[in-house]
Image (spheres, rainbow, N blue to C red):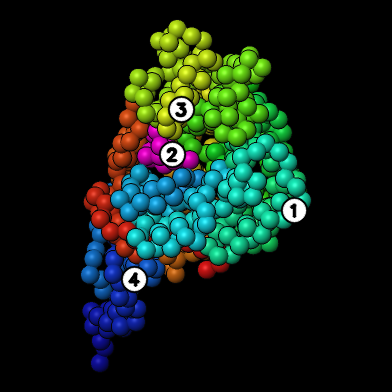
Amino acid sequence: MNKSPFIVTCVLFALVSCQKKTIDADILIQNGTVYNGINKQPFKHTIAVKNDKIVYIGDALDVDINTSKTIDASGLIVSPGFIDPHTHADREFNKPETAHNLPFLMQGITTVVAGNDGDSFFPAQTHVDMYEEHGIGTNAILLIGHETIRKEVIGLSDRVATSEEIVQMQALLDKEMEAAGNFGMSTGLFYAPGSYATTSEVIELAKTCAENGGIYDSHLRDESSYTVGLVAAVEEAIQIGREAKLPIHISHIKCLGVDVWKKSDTIISMVEAAQKEGIAVSANQYPYEASATGLKAATAPKWAQSGGTDSLLYRYDSPQHRQRILAETKNNIRRRGGPESLLIVVIQNPEYRNKTLLQISKDLGIPPEEAVYKILRTKGIIRIASFNMADYDIHNFMKQKWVTTGSDGNTGHPRKYGSFPRKYRKYVVDEGVLDLPTFINQSSSKTAEILGISNRGILKEGYFADIILFDPTTFRDKADFKNAYAYAEGLQYAIINGQIAVEKGEPSDKRHGRVLRKNN
């Protein structure tokens, strides 16, 4: 007797259904446009999360998924959580009331690197223990600061380290990296006292870092024409990588100031030549025309800063040094585009806040270079935004495969609250410098690859569930130089280690981040 086609179809459907894999999940994400961090083309995949891992990513029809929480991602971009390779978020982590790390989290950042620019908290293990005790809102990767190590051994003096002191610094670095699982060493060779170190000193410490499997992250000795010049500073970083045999990561790569505009072509050629030589060189970049730093660091001569601010002001008051200091300060101001380009963004004295150096000098009736030292006599931290970069170089660096997204997030500059959504809105949507998948890759998987972060940065089965969902029509930065403290908009969901940290645009009051360790 012949079976009807209908019966045969039903039997086949039943057999296929019986063969489907059943998956138990805590969270199910469906109907979104999924960029996995690697591929150019998006998928309409379903993602299942169990505990802290992605347990399934693929076609929903191929499996049966049991879940207690379903997220309808219709109209949303689903992406790996962003990784910020250059922040100062350890200052947030140190206090329970700010440890949620919301300025970064609300940008879609699920992992931050801290301890950059040669400046880290010491000893690292004490702070790791603190973070794990009170919890942190994003994952954290820690670097050991060269400046921090140098201050422990030498102090603030402007002098060459002895061979015995280098051995002491190596021992401290080795102990720090082993104890806390730090991912590498950072330098701030532009800043005193890090600037007092010779290249050979840094190479010897970088060798210790390499023995521990670490990366070398550097604020270059010069991003402009202050001392050795931008090109020579990049050459120095490459030399350190060559001789110490470890990966080099140049932080916030830029051509800072009129003397070095359009040097990006030269820098790119140098990096590509080093890569062909076998040296792993990469960089990060924040998407702003203005940098940020301390007023003292930007304007005062390095030699005059030896010993700290009090020593600088003592030398300034000395007839022997005053005219030289003023002349060099005037030239440093010129390098950064003039006094009209330097905006005071953080200072205790409200009379100076949100004014340019030019405005303040006119108010005081003195030249801008003299106004610098009048301002430095006020108490507390003094930070500036310095408008000194050209679009040509910003675009040029941004298009390179070895350049990732970073914020250098610090108080007073909008980049702390807006770098990643600004890059998306300005350079993907408005100007078309990058396409969307390249932006996501530069903000997640590429950064994980450079830093050596295992099982993060890609949406893949078995990887940790650090996932974000953002609205492509509303994802944007809101912070600017008048209000640098406004949270970004458009992030709908953030999942960190399998736990929901942001839901329907609202952050959770719980902290789901972890301190990630190189040796684990």
Could you tell me how far apart the alpha carbons at marks 1 and 3 are, in whole angstroms? 38 Å
Label annotation for residue 384: 3
Could you tell me how far apart the alpha carbons at marks 1 and 2 are, in whole angstroms? 35 Å
Q: Counting other residues with Cα less than 10 Å from the Cα at mark 2, is it few (<14), some (14-19), or many (20 or more)? A: some
Residue 167: x %, y % from top left: 72, 56
* Residue shown at the point (30%, 71%) measured from the top left: 25
**Amino acid type, mark 4:** Lys
Could you tell me how far apart the alpha carbons at marks 4 and 1 are, in whole angstroms? 52 Å
Near-viewer residue (437 or 105): 105
> Which residue position holds label 2?
410
Instruction: Find out whether the residues at labels 2 and 4 contact each other: C-beta distance under 8 Å.
Output: no
Near-viewer residue (323 or 78): 323
> Which residue position holds label 4?
50
* Residue shown at the point (62%, 57%) measured from the top left: 173
Magenta-colored span = 407-421
Asked if residue 439 shows in the view, the reply is no
Residue 202: x %, y % from top left: 69, 47
Residue 106: x %, y % from top left: 33, 46
Locate residue 345: give its quadrant.
top left
Q: What element carries label 2?
A: loop
Please state which of the two labelled residues, at mark 1 or mark 3, is closer to the viewer: 1
Quarter holding the N terminus is bottom left
> Which residue position holds label 1?
164
**Amino acid type, mark 1:** Glu
Residue found farthest to the bottom: 1
Could you tell me how far apart the alpha carbons at marks 2 and 3 are, in whole angstroms? 11 Å
Could you tell me how far apart the alpha carbons at marks 3 and 4 are, in whole angstroms? 45 Å
Could you tell me how far apart the alpha carbons at marks 2 and 4 are, in whole angstroms? 35 Å
Note whether 316 is above or below 34 in the view shown: above
Q: What element carries label 4?
A: strand
**Amino acid type, mark 2:** Asn
Please state which of the two labelled residues, at mark 1 or mark 2, is closer to the viewer: 1
